[in-house]
Amino acid sequence: MTEMITAELVDLDLSAQTKDEAARSLAERMVARGRVTDLDGFLADVAAREAQMPTGLDGGIGIPHCRSAHVTEPTLAFGRAAHGIDFGAPDGPADLIFLIAAPAGADDAHLSILSSLARQLMDEDFKAALRAATDAQHTAALIRGDAPAPEPVEAEPVEPEPVEPEPVEPELVGPEPVEPELVGPEPVESGEAVAPAASRVFKIVAVTSCPTGIAHTYMAAESLENTARATDGVELVVETQGSAGFTRLAPEVIAAADGVIFAHDVPVREKDRFAGKPTVDVGVKAGINRPAALITEVRDKAARGETTAAPGADASSTPVDNSGESAEGYGTKLRKWLMSGVSYMVPFVAAGGLLIALGFAIGGYEVADVKVETLLNSFDWSSTTSWAALLFYTGQAAFAFLVPVLAGYIAYGMADRPGLVPGFVGGSIALTVNAGFLGGLAAGLIAGGVVMAIQKVNVPAVLRGIMPVVVIPLLSSIAVGFLMFVVIGKPIANLQSALTDWLNSLSGANAIFLGVILGLMMCFDLGGPLNKCAYAFAVGGLANPTDGSLKVMAAVMAAGMVPPLAMALATTVRGRLFTKTERENGKAAWVLGASFITEGAIPFAAADPLRVIPASMAGGAVTGALSMAFGCTLRAPHGGIFVVPLIGNAFLYLLAIAAGVCVSAALVVVLKGMRKVPSESAAGADGAQSGAATGSKVPAAV
C-alpha cells in the first residue's frame, strides 16, 4: 500500500480564503498524485458531507472528509493557513486543515489509520509540532507517525521538588475529601464531589459515531478517554461505531457500568444493550468539545437515580439497530432478520394499500380499468375518476416495492449495507418469476447468507478496498440470481400459486379454521413476532388480490382490533376488578383498538398475562372465524374502523368484531373475578407496571 500522505500532499502555505477553496486546493494535489479520479465529483461529495455537519473543531482544526467513489485509495492532504479559514468551529477559524479522502469501500486497515490521525489531533504537542514545522517532508512523516513530535522543553519542571511543606499538605488536604462527601449532591460542576466516587471507581461506557465514521467518531472517543483518565475516580470505555463496523463492548463491561454516554450523529446500534442506566445522549461534537461536562452530567444523573427505559421498551430502535452478531441463538437472530424486512416493508404497505383503497372508495372498483395512458394524457382536474385513478396507480407503485424491500432489508438485517443490493435484486427476481411474498423471504435470507459467507473469505489486501462496492454486490447478485432463476424460483412460484388457489377455494370449514388460526396468532403476543407473521401473510396477498386473500386481510385486521377493545369494555363494565391506572389505560384502549393498534392491550397483558392473553386469544379466534364465515373482504392493509366503507359485508364485519370483543371481555371479567380484588394500595405497583408499558403507539404490524 502506498503512503497515505507524502510531501506532495502537504501545503504549509495554504492561501485559500474559504473552506471550499481550501478543499479544492488540497484535492488538486490528490488528483495530481492519482488518488482522486474526478475532482468535481469528489468535491461534491466533500460538500455533501460538510452540509451534514460542520467539520471545524476547537483548537484551530478543520477536518473536511468524505467517502467517495472517486477516490482510488485512502489519502490525506494537509494544509496550514496562516490567516485561518472558517470551518464552523465554535472557537473561530482553523489554521490546520486536513482533507481526508476515503474510497467508498475502504477496508478496516485503512480506516484504522484514519482513526489514529483523529486521535492524534487531540494531542496538543502534536498540533504544536505541526504549527512549528518548516519542511513538507518532515510534516508528512510527522502525520504518518514516522517522525516523533518534539516534546516540550519544560515538560518536567524541577520546581515542585524544592517545596518541602509536602508533609504538611496531606494534613491540610486530609479533611477535604470528607467535605465533598458531605456536600456531594450540591455542586453540579464537580463530579469528584459525589461520595460514591470517593469510595469506588465510577464506571462509564460510551458510544461514538458520526455520519462517515472516519474522523469525529474517533476524535470523540479519544477526547472522552483522555478526560476520564485525567478525572479521579472515573473509568471510561468507548465503543466506536465507525465505517468499518464496530466491536461490541463485552456484556459484562456494560452490566458493570454506572452510566452511559452516547456521542453520535447516526443511530446507535443495539441501543437496548445500554437500557436501564443513567444516560447522556448528545451529538458527536459534544464528545469532542466538552467531554468533562458530559462525564459530570452522567455522574449527576446517576446520583439522582435517573435511568433510561428498561430493555426492549425503546420504541425508536429498529430491528436493524438490534440485529447483527451477538450471543443470541440462531432462532432469535432469524426472527430479528425477518422482522427487519417486515418493519421496513410496512410503510410501503400502509401508504400503497391505503392509496389503492382510497382510489376504490372514490372511483369504485372499475378505476382499475383506467389506462395509465389516459391518466397521463387526459387528466381531468374536476373528475373524481381521474383523481381516483391517480391514487390507485400511485398506490400500485408503492405496492410494487413490497417484495424487493422485504428481501432487501432481511439481507440488510443479516449483513448490513452489503446485503442491500443482492437482497433487492433477489426480491425483484421473486416478482419476475411469480414467487411473490414467499420468494421475497427466501431471496432475502439467501442474499444475506451469501454476503455473510463472502465476508468471511480472507482476500488480498489490494482487493479489500473494492470489496463492499464492487466484489460483494457482483458475486452475491450472481449467486442470488442463479439460485432464484434456476434452483428455487420455480418451486416457490408453484407453492405460491398453490397457496393462492387454496385461498380462492376457501369456503365453509376450511375458511373458518384459517380464521381461527389467524385470530390466535394476532392476539397471542399483541404485536410481537406471531402477530407480525400473520399480518405479513395477509399483506402479501394484497400484492395480487383475490377473493381469498381479501378475506384473509379482513380477518387479520378484525382479530387485531379485539384485544384493546375488549380491555376497554372490561374496564368499563367491571372497573373494580382493575387498578386505577388500568382504568385510565382502558379509556385510551377504545381509540387504539378502533385504529387497529393491537399494542393498546399490552399494559393489561404486562400486569396480568395469564388472564389477559388467553382471553384475548379466545376473542380473536371467534372474530377471525366469523369474519371468514361471513365472507368479509378488505382491500386496505390498515385503518381499523376508519376503512369500514371499503369492507365487503361491513355490517357482518363489525358484528364479528363485536362478538370477539364481548367474548374476550367476559373471559377477562370471569378470570379476574376469581382472584382477590386488588386494593388501591396495590394499584400503585400494578399501575406502575402497566403504565410503563403504555408508551407503544405502534400499529400491530409495525
Image: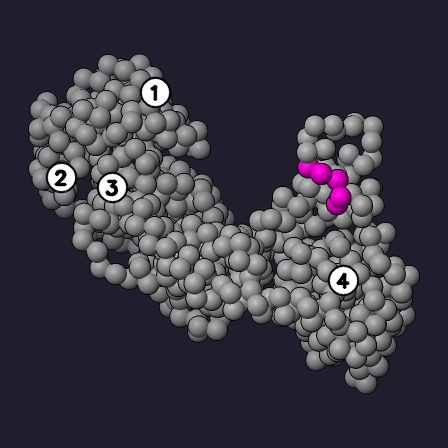
User: Along the polypeptide, which appears first: circle 3 or circle 2?
Assistant: 2
Amino acid residing under circle 1: Asp
Amino acid residing under circle 4: Asp
Q: Which residue is mark 1?
A: 20
Foreground mark, 4 or 2, reads: 4
Q: Which residue is mark 3?
A: 114
* Cα distance in 3D space between marks 3 and 1: 22 Å
* Cα distance in 3D space between marks 3 and 2: 14 Å
Boundaries of the magenta span: 368-372
Q: Position of residue 45 (x, y in %)?
A: 37, 30
Q: In this rendering, is residue 533 above or below 2? A: below
Disc 2 element = loop
Binning the other alpha carbons within 10 Å of mark 2 as few (below 14), some (14 to 19) or many (20 upward) gives: few
User: Along the polypeptide, which appears first: circle 2 or circle 1?
Assistant: 2
Pick the quarter of the image with the C terminus: bottom right
Q: Position of residue 644 (x, y in %)?
A: 84, 54
Q: Residue at x 37, y 55 (%)?
A: 478
Foreground mark, 2 or 1, reads: 2
Q: Which residue is mark 4?
A: 547
Amino acid residing under circle 2: Thr
Q: Main secondary structure of the magenta part?
A: helix
Which is more toward the observer, 495 or 140?
495
